[in-house]
Image (cartoon, coloured by chain):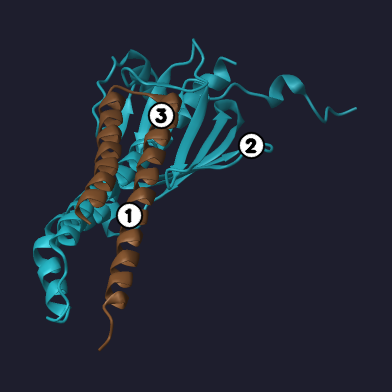
Amino acid sequence: MPTIFDSSTSTPAPAKSKKTAKLSASLLSKGKNHMGPLTFFAVNPDGVRFETQEEEEKVILFLRQHIIVNFPWVVVAVVAVFAPTVLFPLLLRLIPPSVVVPSGYIVVGALFWYVATFGFVLGNFLSWFFNIYIVTNQRLVDIDFQYLLYKNFAEAELVKIQDISFTSGGVFAALFNYGTVNIQTAGEAPNFEFNSVPYPERVVETIRSLIGQAGSNP
Amino acid sequence: MIPPIFPEAIALIVKLLFLLGLVIYAVFAAVIVRQEHLMADVLEEGFEPILRIFTYIHLALAIFMIFLGFILL
């Protein structure tokens, strides 16, 4: 009777490409990288720990959205800082001369404007700062804080990852080399999107090499 | 002659709305402080204590604005 299925030959060991093997070796041999407040891409970051991280778990890749995504709100903040000197006199000119605005309102209004601008900058910076993507030697972690009020913590084990791809589009993305990494996972685990992360091709290569390692060392 | 009660009433409403806005803003500042604490529990990082100081400064300024509003308005 002919052999239809032979388990000894159906599961060959995953063959690593030279590039992937080289990357794996370089990731393991690399020393710790210092983390600054504006770091958005770090391999083997120093001093980073996250909730639910296990003792033997090692952070390989630490990602935030590319810093250039902050450009729009930074522009708004700069305009807001200079607005009172331009905008307030214009608004006061619109008020009929018969109406006298008490100086207390002008003082409190102007000061409040600057405090609110500070709050706007702080809120946007915190949203960017704490929206992080972490790749460890065991899993992927996606931590999102939306509008400072909603927290979303998602994770997927490396062995459950089925497919990785990235997309990069737009003038800014092409200029500053960032894109969205899409990760499909098996089962009921949610699919991941690493939005606007820098060097998406390096992120994909790194995750792929770690999957290879995780597959060879279950 | 129109009695000056109407402009005074408007002034009072504007003042109350101003103060209400300042109080709501202070609550928002307190929420930012609380959220920063929650975020810091999720991620331990070197720059986080400095961010915490900034959130407290922001809250202090928001509370100061309420007092300033009570005094000047």
As drawn, the chain in brown is: B
Do badges 1 and 3 share one subunit? yes
**Does dot 3 land on a helix, a strand or a loop?**
helix
Outermost residue toward the top in this view: A55
* CA–CA distance in space, label 2 to label 1: 48 Å
For marks 1 and 3, the one nearer the N-term is 1
Figure quadrant of the N terminus of chain B:
bottom left
Task: Residue at 40%, 27% (x, y): give it.
Answer: B40
* Residue receiving disc 1: B19
Disc marking residue A189: 2
Q: Are marks 3 and 2 in contact (CB under 8 Å)?
A: no
Q: What's the CA distance linking mark 3 and mark 2?
A: 28 Å
Q: In the figure, residue B56 lies in which quadrant?
A: top left
Q: Is residue A76 left or right of residue A188?
A: left
Q: Which residue is mark 3?
A: B37
Q: Quadrant of residue A96?
A: bottom left
- Residue B69, x across and y down, in percent: 25, 51
| 2 or 1: mark nearer the eye | 1
**Picture quadrant where residue A218 is located:** top right
Q: Amino acid at mark 1?
A: Leu
- Colour used to depict chain A in the structure image: cyan
Q: Nearer the viewer, mark 3 or mark 2?
A: 3
* SS for dot 2: loop
Query: Residue A66, percent across and down?
Result: 30, 43
**Distance between the alpha carbons at the discs numbered 1 and 3:** 27 Å
Examine the rendering and report whether any part of residue A121 can be seen: no
